[in-house]
Image: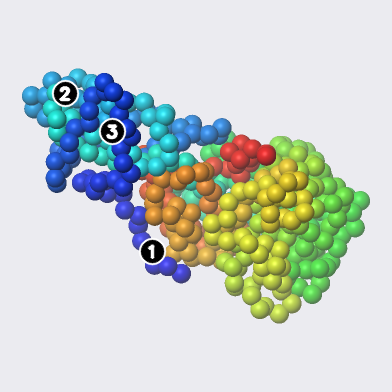
Amino acid sequence: MKPFHLLSLSFLPLTLLAACPASQDSGEVPAPTVPDGLDGSAHIASFQAWYLVGNARTPGGDTLALVVDPPAGADGVELWIDGQHSGAWPAQPGQLIDADLSALGAGEHELLLAASGEGQAFARLALQRSHPLYVLVTNDWDRSYKEDSWLERQEQLHANHPAMKMTHFVGPYTFTDPEVSAQHAADLVAWLLGMVADFDDEIGLHVHPYCNFVETTSVPCRHEPSFGYVEDETGYTVELSSYSLEETEILLEQAKSLFDANGIGTPTSFRAGGWTAAIHTLEALANTGFVADTSAANWARLEEWEGIPDAGLYEWNQEHWATIDDTSQPYYPSQDDILLSEPPFVPILEVPDNGALVDYVDVYEIIEMFEANWPGGAALQQPTTYVTGYHPVSYDFINSVALEGGLDHIDQFLAADGTGPVVYETMSAMATVWPQP
């Protein structure tokens, strides 16, 4: 576990960039020289340093947002990006420099500002153009009921992080458990729909094969193999992968019918209970209309389960998700190997749960894994995901402090604020960012 630290976002004064400026076409205005020790901060009224490279889901940041106060006596202000003359503007206090950035690739770019006709720059800045770092906050409904305190903590999470979206992986057993009243189920539906309407959250599907759910179908309920006990009469800890392709399809269609009957729409994202999905589970998901799965577990972060007698959760995930770690990224699995991305593909995007859940990690680990997916705080050369979240049943004060602290750190780097590449998104949206091969 690495110590907590903040990524530096200091841009003035700047050191020379390692990359050489782009060559200039003949007839272009030559770039100004940069005097030693240049500190042009007095001329920079405001500067947005980070801009996104857009994709099919997320618009790019294609227009420079820079406001300058030119030197006294300047006739105009001119801009060079990576040595290329990029425009001229009037010399007036609070002048907006709104150059087009759409042609800039991912990476760090040098901006030079000079008064018109002057050979020396009066300011130099570094602009970062990055692909998004998608932060996906998820929760797994392991229980059929919900206490008010659980819902209140989740509401507080939204209140404290206004940019955040969640993917709620809802269990269909909420609608089949005889201990859950129709009124309680209806209240939970209303709460979920409020989260979608107010925060653009997503409702996905989470399946532990509870017998009260499985037995509403033609599929017989299993009591083993269990990842938590020798035998589980409730079905809760039974490995979902123990159900065949055909059986899983029946369970998924029943879950979708229950969602539809209760007015919460059709789920298109999924996580298996205990992360116990196999390749045939993913095939069943694809066959029933799902576009994204996030059952690939960062098993090394589940060490709390290691060695517990008769509980095989750690060992199952270690074996079946052997290559998944802190920085694993979305892929389309091979039909022949769930850990490979080679044709023939299963047509569903696997989004690894690379940040695990707050039940198993503390605030320092949350930040450590986030930073591992944003190496050195540099511009990202491709879209990247970081998945975190919680179980509502165990989202107590201690776990909420850890997750809140991690998100407080992440919120410093929001693309919407121009301070980094972070974009909060939902799970199904990732299938738009990573289309099928």
* Residue found 64% across the figure and 54% down from its top: 140
Please name the residue that numbered disc 1 is placed on: 4
* Residue found 87% across the figure and 50% down from its top: 246
Residue 226 seen in render: yes
Please name the residue that numbered disc 2 is placed on: 116
What amino acid does circle 3 point to? Answer: Gly
What amino acid does circle 1 point to? Answer: Phe
Q: Earlier in the sequence, mark 1 or mark 3?
A: 1
Q: Nearer the viewer, mark 1 or mark 2?
A: 2
Q: Residue furthest front?
A: 26
Q: Position of residue 70 (x, y in %)?
A: 15, 28
* Residue found 53% across the figure and 39% down from its top: 199
Q: Position of residue 420 (x, y in %)?
A: 39, 44
Please name the residue that numbered disc 3 is placed on: 83
Q: Position of residue 38 (x, y in %)?
A: 15, 43
The answer to whether residue 178 is left or right of residue 61 is right
